[in-house]
Image (cartoon, rainbow, N blue to C red):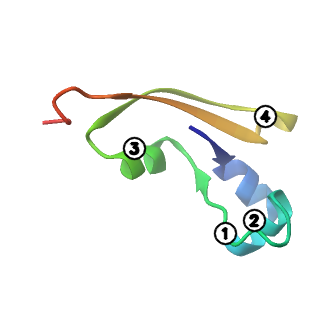
């Protein structure tokens, strides 16, 4: 999964996801979320395992990448 890091959101000074969207993907973008490991785990739930993540790009906070694996038993 490709996303925007929490650090980029915080550095931007955006008040919310709508303001952050205008700064990242343009003024007509309705909403952008930032992601970190905990938020990705919550988003995908117990049926997926977060294998690794990393921030990259300008100053190391432009984008982030998460690699997840679907758990065969659904996390039970």
Marks 2/1 in contact by CB < 8 Å: the verdict is yes
Marks 3/1 in contact by CB < 8 Å: the verdict is no
Between discs 3 and 4, the one toward the N terminus:
3
Residue picked out by circle 1: 31
Q: Position of residue 72 (x, y in %)?
A: 21, 26
Measure the alpha-carbon separation of dots 3 and 1: 20 Å
Between discs 2 and 3, the one toward the N terminus:
2
Q: Position of residue 42 (x, y in %)?
A: 37, 51
Along the line of sight, the residue nearer the viewer: 30 or 76 = 30
Q: Residues within 10 Å of mark 3 (few under 14, many from 20)?
A: some
Mark 3 falls on what kind of element?
A: helix
Residue picked out by circle 4: 60
Between discs 3 and 1, the one toward the N terminus:
1
Measure the alpha-carbon separation of dots 3 and 4: 21 Å
Image-based side of 16 in relation to 50, left or right: right
Viewport quadrant of the C terminus: top left
Measure the alpha-carbon separation of dots 2 and 1: 5 Å
Does 7 sit above or below residue 57? below
């Amino acid at each position: 999964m490709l996303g925007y890091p929490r650090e980029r959101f915080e550095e931007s000074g955006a008040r919310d996801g709508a303001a952050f969207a205008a700064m990242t993907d343009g003024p007509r973008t309705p909403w952008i979320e930032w992601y970190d490991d905990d938020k990705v785990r919550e988003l995908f739930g117990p049926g997926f395992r977060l294998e690794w993540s990393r921030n990259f790009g300008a100053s190391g906070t432009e984008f982030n990448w998460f690699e997840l694996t679907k758990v065969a038993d659904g996390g039970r």
